[in-house]
Image: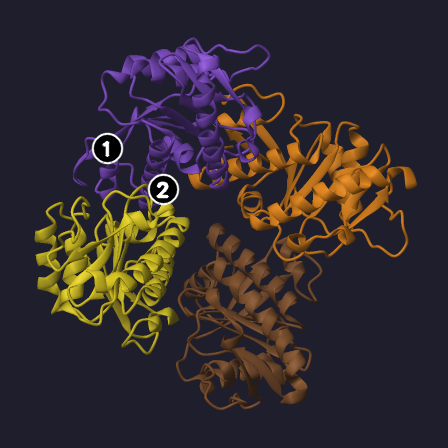
Chain colours: A brown, B orange, C purple, D yellow
Amino acid sequence: MEHLQGVFFERTAELIAAGHRLYQRGWLPATSGNLSARLDHRRFAITVSGTHKGTLTDQDIMAVNEKGHALEPGMRPSAETLLHVALYLADPEVGAVLHVHSPSATVLSLATPGERVRLSGFELIKAFPGHTSHDEVLEVPIFDNDQHIPRLVEAVNARAGGTPAVPGYLIRGHGLYAWGPDVARTMHYLEAFDFLFNCQLQLGASQP
Amino acid sequence: MEHLQGVFFERTAELIAAGHRLYQRGWLPATSGNLSARLDHRRFAITVSGTHKGTLTDQDIMAVNEKGHALEPGMRPSAETLLHVALYLADPEVGAVLHVHSPSATVLSLATPGERVRLSGFELIKAFPGHTSHDEVLEVPIFDNDQHIPRLVEAVNARAGGTPAVPGYLIRGHGLYAWGPDVARTMHYLEAFDFLFNCQLQLGASQP
Amino acid sequence: MEHLQGVFFERTAELIAAGHRLYQRGWLPATSGNLSARLDHRRFAITVSGTHKGTLTDQDIMAVNEKGHALEPGMRPSAETLLHVALYLADPEVGAVLHVHSPSATVLSLATPGERVRLSGFELIKAFPGHTSHDEVLEVPIFDNDQHIPRLVEAVNARAGGTPAVPGYLIRGHGLYAWGPDVARTMHYLEAFDFLFNCQLQLGASQP
Amino acid sequence: MEHLQGVFFERTAELIAAGHRLYQRGWLPATSGNLSARLDHRRFAITVSGTHKGTLTDQDIMAVNEKGHALEPGMRPSAETLLHVALYLADPEVGAVLHVHSPSATVLSLATPGERVRLSGFELIKAFPGHTSHDEVLEVPIFDNDQHIPRLVEAVNARAGGTPAVPGYLIRGHGLYAWGPDVARTMHYLEAFDFLFNCQLQLGASQP
């Protein structure tokens, strides 16, 4: 992967900075969460399994292929790497995937029965592509948690066709996956999701 | 605008510092909000549309005229610039306008039916001009959100005559506009509003 | 006050540092609160009226006498200076008085009817002198707010004899006054009060 | 203890850094909490009684033996040192014990009747050894608070045999004790416990 070195170093620096900021916000407690960025059409940089995101260094970022396998021997990717890879393979425009355990995502996904959170009335809905008014409904899919990641990937892929394009989904009691064209814009989506989830929880209303 | 360069640089520095602090507080998630300051009687500095306020630089502040049009070609002001300009034109004492998406402003404006939030019993009410006792009622107008900004400007202007002079109003589900003689004192008003809104939400009482 | 210069400089530095920290915590929104420390048996250093505590400098601290009057002309002490002075005069061991508008103090004082908050079951009650077990009841007096400060001073003095010695009291909807032998230990009391008030609010129980 | 100097200095540096971070989080209000690390099979470094953890220096860490007595004269260990020592003696793998007064631990332990908090449905349960699915139940023991520490030690020891191995327990109204192989991993456990306690409180459900 010699010709990828430059882009790998750049994405690594971005993921480290993102990890530190997201940890400071309390969205990556203990060694939870995983962060990735696209290197090319079939290779991706991702945090090593079990790392603490508040103290990430370049030793904690590894490269994987489109099957989620390590490109270099001796490093173990997280089992959840497959969820990241599935998002990259489904859409060539996806440049980064950030998975956080924010309290708002965890609590709202447990407090909301059914397959989606529906958000409306918030100006910040317009932070998401394709939404031009607070009057629209932003639907964020919720998937039941599953320790068998390939089965979870299948569930996500099966439903993706049937839901409006929102750059994120919840796994119940587990947290939020969000993606975007690059790390910076995916950070913006995380901020917008968290803001909306917190407001919704404070309003105490699960809009049908 | 050569003769305005000095004041433009000063206001730009103040708006950048304010943006960084307000972002740190969580009041400007994603690229939401917009911040402005008066340059003279008919020109104003304002954040460029779609900028992230946590990483504002002097490239993200532009100058607009009293119609909200860019003074220099190639920069796009936010549609909400008209709400800022309306406040400057209505009162020559207004030196800064800061619009934030704080969670408290968003949630309280959605949780409160009707056209205003009424706050009473708080010593901090005295932070606002013309209020000398905790026993008084601070009325903060709420306007329904509207994606058609000129219509929203009209609604604000139509009601301004009928409400007591409080340096702020809420747009439902959208956030808070506050203004003052300069950026520093407008920051104080934002702090006071947010404190009061949070206390009111915690008290769980929407006083009629 | 030449011979007081040294101690005035030391206390000023302590009050400035305390102001910055308390502002960062959100306990001094806008220009609220006031902070003081004893200089000798009848002179005290206190924040100037209307200063923002997040940006305190040594120009914002002044000296007052036992009547609350400025020792040097041209500086205006806060009206609430009398509440500080009353505490110093009542007990020569009081070395510092810190008055904050913390959200927890504001909300709990409004949510609790009657003349006191009663706290029990918390280990942290032992942070206060004379309390040796979580089973004891910590009684924090609440006074109704009053814009006439001399009348408020009288109310505080009249009740002081009848309540257990706790180094703090609440003014309803206004905030917390706390005191101690020096600024550092008064900061500890503020932390303990705020922790207990927040826990009590979260528990949702106003113990009779 | 000459040959222990090196390890004492290292553990002291770790405990100081941990104290500063935990204080910043609001988990060590006033002078509450105590932090320790193992030096060898029968000696331990621990914070001196009554120190403020936000300003810890190496003067605030002392060494104690397996009876909780100071190794050097003139320093007073906290009465709760016995709870730390009991954990080290019960399991030679325990390398650090951190006791915090986090709001979540305090409130949840008071809001939950009975002898344990039961947590389920959270992915973060997997942060704890021996838990491999969100479907499992994480049981965190609660002990009633007791000012007589030897009796509290007995109560903890008596129950330890009957509960699943979770690296932490709550003392009602008092806070959380957590332990691990070293300071860093114990910090991770604290983060995971606090996250779970907060989510559980937000969900408002005390699962039976």
Gap between marks 2 and 1, in whole Å? 15 Å
Q: Say which of B139 and C109 sits in front.
A: C109
Provide residue C169's location: percent of width, then percent of height.
34, 26
Where is the N terminus of chain D found, in terms of image quarters?
A: bottom left
Which quadrant holds residue D185? bottom left
Q: Which residue is mark 1?
A: C138
x, y (%) of residue A195? 55, 56
Instruction: State the residue in front, C171 or A205.
Output: C171
- The residue type indicated by label 1 comes to Leu
Is residue D199 shown left or right of residue B90?
left
Pointer 2 and pointer 1 on the same chain:
yes
Count neighbours of disc 1 (C-alpha within 10 A) and say few if under 14, some if 14 to 19, many if 20 or more. Answer: many
**Residue A8 as seen in the image, left or right of residue A23:** right
In the rendered picture of this protein, how many numbered marks are placed on residues? 2
Q: Three-letter amino acid code at disc 2?
A: Asn
- The tag earlier along the polypeptide, 2 or 1, is 1
Q: Secondary structure at mark 1?
A: strand
Q: Does the rendering let one see residue B98?
A: yes
Give the residue at x 62% y 62%.
A188
Q: Which mark is residue C198?
A: 2
Quadrant where the C terminus of chain D is found in the figure:
bottom left
Q: Chain of mark 1?
A: C
- Picture residue at 37% right of the left edge, 58% below the top: D203
Q: Is residue C144 above or below residue D147?
A: above
Decide: is D59 above or below A13: above
* Left or right, residue D175 beside residue C96: left
State whether residue B48 appears in this view: no
**Location of residue A29 with respect to C86 vertically, above or below:** below
Q: Position of residue C39 (x, y in %)?
A: 40, 19
